[in-house]
Amino acid sequence: MRFFTIIWRILKELGDENAYQRHLRVHNRVHSAEEYRHFQTEHFRAKYQRAKCC
C-alpha cells in the first residue's frame, strides 16, 4: 500500500498537480477552469523563460 502511495505522489508532482494545489493555497483561490488556465500560462512562461545552459 505504501508503495502505491509513493508512486501516486511522484506522478502528481511530475504532472504539476502539486504545483497547482500550492498555487491555489498561496493565492487563496478555488479550482476553476479559468484559474487553471491562469496557472498554466504563468507556470509555463516562467519555465521557458529561464536561461538554459549547454
Image (cartoon, rainbow, N blue to C red):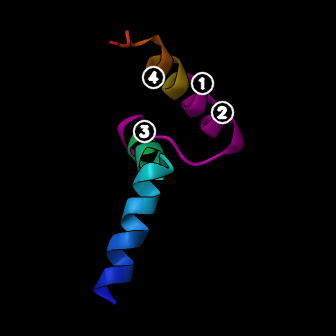
Callout in the foreground (3, 1): 1
Which numbered disc, 3 or 1, marks the residue that appears first in the sequence?
A: 3
* Residue 14 drawn at (x, y percent): 44, 50
Give the spatial CA distance, label 2 vs label 3.
12 Å
Callout in the foreground (3, 4): 4
* Residue 38 is inside the magenta segment: yes
Label 2 environment density (alpha carbons within 10 Å; few <14, some 14–19, many ≥20): few
Of 35 and 41, nearer the camera is 41
Mark 3 — residue?
23
Residue 52 position (above or below residue 8): above
User: Where on the picture, by quarter, is residue 47?
Assistant: top left
Residue placed at 38% from the left, 71% from the top? 7
Mark 2 — residue?
37
Numbered disc 1: secondary structure = helix
Which numbered disc, 1 or 4, marks the residue that appears first in the sequence?
A: 1
Residue 22 position (above or below residue 53): below
* Residue 49 drawn at (x, y percent): 46, 11
Mark 4 — residue?
47
Residue placed at 41% from the left, 34% from the top? 27
Give the spatial CA distance, label 1 vs label 2.
6 Å
The N terminus: image quadrant: bottom left
Give the spatial CA distance, label 3 vs label 1.
12 Å
Is the residue under label 2 in contact with that under label 4 (CB below 8 Å)? no
Which numbered disc, 4 or 2, marks the residue that appears first in the sequence?
A: 2
Numbered disc 4: secondary structure = helix
Q: From the viewer's perspective, is 7 left or right of 40?
A: left
Which numbered disc, 3 or 4, marks the residue that appears first in the sequence?
A: 3
Residue placed at 58% from the left, 32% from the top? 40
